[in-house]
Structures are given as structure tokens and as C-alpha cells.
Image (spheres, coloured by chain):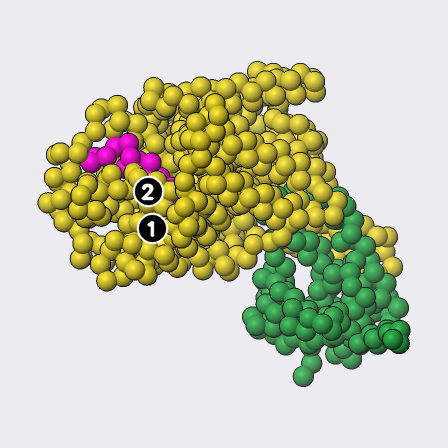
Chain colours: A yellow, B green
Amino acid sequence: MSNAVTGSFTAVGEAQEPHAVGLRRAVGIWGSFSWGYADVGADVYVALGLVVAAAQGLAPMAFALTGMIYMFIGLAYTELAAAYPVAGGGHYYTLRGLGDLLGFTAGWALLLDFTIDVSLFALASAGYINFFFPFLNGRVTLPIFGPIQLWLMIEAIVLVVFLIVLNLRGIRESSTLNSLTSAVDMFNESVIIVVGFLFAFSPNLLFAQFQTQAPDTYHFFYGASIAIISFVGLESISQAAEETLRPASIVPRTSLALIFTVLIYALSFSTLGLGMVLDPSKPSWQVISENVGDPVAVLAHHIPFLGFIAGPFTALLAATLVYASANTGVMGYSRITWSMSKFRLLPGWFKEVHAEYRTPYRTILVFSGVALLQIILASLSGQAYDTLGNMYAFGAVTGYILVLISLIRLRMTDPYTPRPYKVPGNFHIMHKGERVEIPIMAFVGLAGNVFIWVLVVLTHSIGRIAGPLWLLIGWGIFFYFRRRENLPLLHSIPRHWESEQMHVLNEAQEYEYLAQYREALKRRDQRLGVARDGADASEGQQKEQTSASDETKGIKH
Amino acid sequence: MKFSKILVPVKGHAVDEQAIRLACQTARQDKAKVLAVTVMELHRTLPLESESPTQIETGEAVLEHAERAARNVGVQIETELLQARVAGPILLELANDRGIDLIILGIPYRPPLDEIALGTTPRHIFRNARCQVWLCRQEAVPEPNLPKK
């Protein structure tokens, strides 16, 4: 692989040398933001009904509690994505920080989330489509399984099959359309919130619900644990970072904007929903929980003046946005699988690209198959949204715990990589002769995530069985593959992270940070007494390391 | 007006050769340099860094074809192989970086779909390029004689 926009030119008459392939990043500020928003911004459309159904009159508190924990994770992702702008996301950070086995575990947990991203959001898209055809939400009684939403399940399956075909054939979605959908959605959500708070919101009603409609402790914590799904999708920050030009300066800005935008919407909708009269005969939380498939559209339908148009428009927009989010799931598991194969955590079989369509067809078929299976099994359970929400929370929190530990560990093992953004609130320690900064907030976030993870395991009857089962299957694949390839089972394959980091910074055109990184390594080498003959020697060594590293990783030039 | 640097995006169409010839004639007249570029567009299910040997091979062949076409008219050109999500913005970025003052686009002739036939890349370049853009459309292929009823 070359660095090379400045790559080689072939002069006429000379022997034909292979061309260097110049990778070009092109995503800018708005593209980076809307990429993340298309993923995380859609979550509230799915989560609102589930959380309100569980946490009832205290739903805003459940969102606030989880929102605080999400902020810590978001800040950690911001730091890591800006420092390591590569495709692997959480699995890559964990691989670098904690080694192969845990890197695989994080990746496998996030893979679960990407498959559920497809199944749950396809189901949610069908739910919002059914705002116009409510009879399709009806239940059909099946022998053994009892009453299930059969038509909803079939709609979701059709939507996923359509996604599979689109992605297998390499049909490109329009990035302009994505950006436009995100912009229209933010405008629409803002209008609903502003008009709702101005003309329909009653603080007295909200406080009355706090006092009279509070759930028991079990249901509150269940709601809080499921509220984490309103904020899942932070992986998209790292995926966008891989394609963002000058990620060090752009990613922190777009990522922080994304974190706060999503948080504000989640808190606003839950507060507004409980402080509005949706049906005079029953508490608002009950109305929302009865419409778990299209809660935001129902809310929009009840706002004064605009409700008659805002309801259908929101349903249409939500169906589009959550379907686009399901598509990001396909992209997510394709990329993370590619990255895991590259680092030899999964068999290279997954990396195979279709000769005609140029898409990773094996990955798409295998993991889309998993997503289809999830839709069927979850629908047969009778509570499709809830079951998938359980699993989504398990996968996300497992991955996030490992990412937060990696953040702390990387601060100690790799203090040399420039961090354009740092999680605030640090204390200093000396570690192996280096003065390193330890982020207090990462510890707080870690405690919060462990708390949510325990809640998921304690309160989610399906999540506590299916989640660990997913991990067990993954470890089985990992150990089988590593044994077959004669690779270390519990230890990591030696890799040259320094040359990889230089390569990434160079490719991202972050030349200033590249110079800082080289300088930091030089200082370390001088301190350790490693002889080097200046920058040229360092560059020469870099090249050697790159080829050695690439041999290890199986990268072809 | 004289040109100093000419960019010709090539994709493996028959019209590439005509675009390269036009660029070479202009370059000879103006003593300009010609840069032929092919962009391998990558679907979003693959990371930007992923490499496909077969796609690279195809890209190489397209560039070699462009070089041959230039050699036939006695001009030496430079070539470059890029990988990106979409070609349009990348070509313009390259044009700005290298100080390109003319882009020559070869467009295949596709009669039934006039608007669509132009493609997203040429449309993007038309709308956003700072420098001059010349269009070199392939000559119309005569309609085949339909059998008489």
C-alpha cells in the first residue's frame, strides 16, 4: 500500500512499474456529522417507546442517567477516533490497547450490534410505515408461539432482503440524499420539540407523572438499561474518521456536536412526551408505550397546529432515516469484519470480494442472514422490539466497556500518538519513565457502563442468555481459527503499531501530527538509548517496519 | 489561451483514447503536461484502505492503454491510480492540488439516456471545476439496420 497522492508516474519508454494506489479521503465537516447522525440520530425513534414503556413516569430520568454515561463513551470515542482515524473502530482501539483476544471480543460484541442495527431498524422502519397502515401491526396467533406480529415481521424481512440485494450489487446510496435527510430530520425534530414545548407542554402534568406514574425499581432500571440504545452508533464516528480529510481537526468538532445533539433530542422527546396530553383517558406514557413501533410519529401527531401534517411527515421521515440506519449496519459489519480479518482475528475468507460487483459478498450474506434470523426469533418471542433492544444493549455495553479500558491503557502504552482531543479531567502519573495523563472521566464512564451491563444481565431475560451465547460462539470461532492457522491463542501477534500510525497520519494528511509523533518517538528512543541517525534513518526504518508489519498482517502491495 | 497542465480522467471506455489524443494535441501546441488519472471507486461496505488486486490490475490496464494512446501521437504523459469513494470530488481536489488548468472529459455515446449518460462524475466536474472543462463525446454510432416487417 502506498502513501501516495504524490505517487509514481510512469514515463513513456520506461519499464512499466506498478502504479502506487493513492487513497483519497473526501468527507468534510457536514459529511462527517451527517454520517454519524444517520446512525445515532435514528436511535431515538426506536428507543423512545421501549424506554417509556419500562420507565413509565420516570422515563426522562432513565434517559438522563444513561445519557450521562453515554457522554463519557462519546468523549472516549472522540479522542480515539481523532487519534487513530482507521476503519476498525472499537475493535481496533481494543486490539491496540488490550491485545488480540479482547480486540476480537470487542469486535464480536460490536458485530452483534451491527446485525441488530439491521434487524431492529428494519423492524422500526416497518413500524413507521405502518403508521399509515395500522392493520399491519395486528397479531396473528401461531401454534406453539402464540400471538405474534406476523405482517410486521414479513415487512421487516422484505426490507432486509432489499438491503442485502442493494449492498451485494454495490448500488451506491447518494451521500447528498443522506446529508439532506439528516438536515430535514433535525429541522423536523426541532420544530416538533419547539412547538410542542411552546403550545402543548404542561410542567404540572410532567411532575404529576413523576409522582403518580413512577415504576418500581426493577422497571426503572430496566428502562435505564434499555435507554442506552438511544445512543448506540458511536462506531460511526470512527467509521467517518477513516474517510475524513484532516480528521484530527474535524472529528472532535463533529463528534462533540453529534453527542450533544442526540442527547438533547432524546431528553426533549421523553420530557415532552410525558408532559403532553396524548389521550385524556390515560397517562401519556401509556399511549407512547402502546405505540412502541412509531412513538415519535404519534407524539408529533398530537402537537397543536401542525400535528395533522407533522404526524405523517414524521412517520415518513422516520421510516426513511431508520432504514438508512439499518443500511449503516450492513456497512458496519462489512467493514469491521474486514478489519478483523486483516488483523487475523477472523478468517480471511470473509474478506473475499465479489468479482463483478466489488462487494464483500460473504460477509454481507453471513451477517445479513444473522439479522434475518434475529427478526424471526425476536418476532416469535412475541415482543420483537424488546427482545432486539435487550441484545442491542448487551452488545453495545460490552464493546463500550472494552473501549473505555483501552482508552486508559493506550494513554499509558502509547502516550506518543498526538491526541487532537483529550477526554477532560486528567491526573498525571509516571509510567515507565513517561509522564502520562490518566482520564478520570474514563473511570467514571467505565463504572457507569459496568453498572448498565450488570443491569442488562440482571433485568433482561433474553439478553443475559443470548448475549453471552453470542460471545461464546465468537470465542469458539476465534480459537478454532487461530489454532488452525498456528497463531497464538491467548497472546497477540507482534505488530508494528508505530509504522502503522505514521502511515495513517500520512494518509490522512495530518503532517503536523505526524511530525509531532516522530519527534515524540525520537525523544523516547533517545531516553531509552536507542541509536538512530536522525529522521532519515527513522524513515528508512519506518519503511522496513511497514513491510515487516504488512507481511505479518497479510497486506498485499 | 494557453494551457500548462491538462487532466484527463480515464475509465476504460473507447472514448478515453480520443480524449487522450485531444489532450496530447493541445499539450503539444501549448507545451503543456498531460496527467491521465483513473479512480477506483469503492463501495461503502469496504473500508477505504482495502485493496483489490483485480481492480488494481484493471486500473493499471486502463492507464497503460492511455499511455499507449499518447505514445502513438508522440507525447509523454503522466499517469496516476487513485482509490476513493466517489471520483468527482477527488478529481477536482487533485486538479486544485496540481494546478490543473484544463480538464478533458471523454464521454461515451449512449443515445437513449441523454441526461443520465453524462454520469455523476462529469456532472460534478461541470458544476464545480474552477478550471476550463472540455467535453469530448464519442462519435454517434449509427443505428443498426432494423429488419423490415
Q: Nearer the viewer, residue A33 or A290?
A: A290
Q: Is residue A128 above or below residue A537?
A: below
Q: Nearer the viewer, residue B84 or A498?
A: B84
User: Which amino acid, mark 1?
Assistant: Ala
- Please identify the quarter of the rendering in which residue A343 is found: top right
Q: CA distance from mark 1 to mark 2?
A: 9 Å
Q: Nearer the viewer, residue A125 or A489?
A: A125
Q: Which residue is mark 2?
A: A291
Give the letter of the chain under mark 1: A
Q: Secondary structure at mark 1?
A: helix
Is residue A413 at least partly visible in the picture? no
- Please identify the quarter of the rendering in which residue A147 is found: top left
Tell me residue A443's x, y (percent).
Answer: 33, 27
The magenta stretch spans residue B134: no
Q: Is residue A196 above or below residue A255?
A: below
Residue at 61% across, 49% down = A166
Q: Is residue A143 left or right of residue A186?
A: right
**Circle 1 residues within 10 Å: few <14, some 14–19, many ≥20:** many
Q: Is residue A330 left or right of residue A412?
A: right
> Does the CB distance between marks 1 and 2 fall below 8 Å?
yes
Q: Which residue is mark 1?
A: A297
Q: Point out the tag, 1 or 2, that comes first from the N-terminus.
A: 2
Main SS, magenta residues: helix
Residue stretch rendered in magenta on the structure: A42-58
Tell me residue A486's x, y (percent).
Answer: 69, 17
The magenta stretch spans residue A50: yes
**Picture quarter with the C terminus of chain A:** top right
Residue at 63% across, 37% down = A365
The residue sitting at the bottom extreme is B1
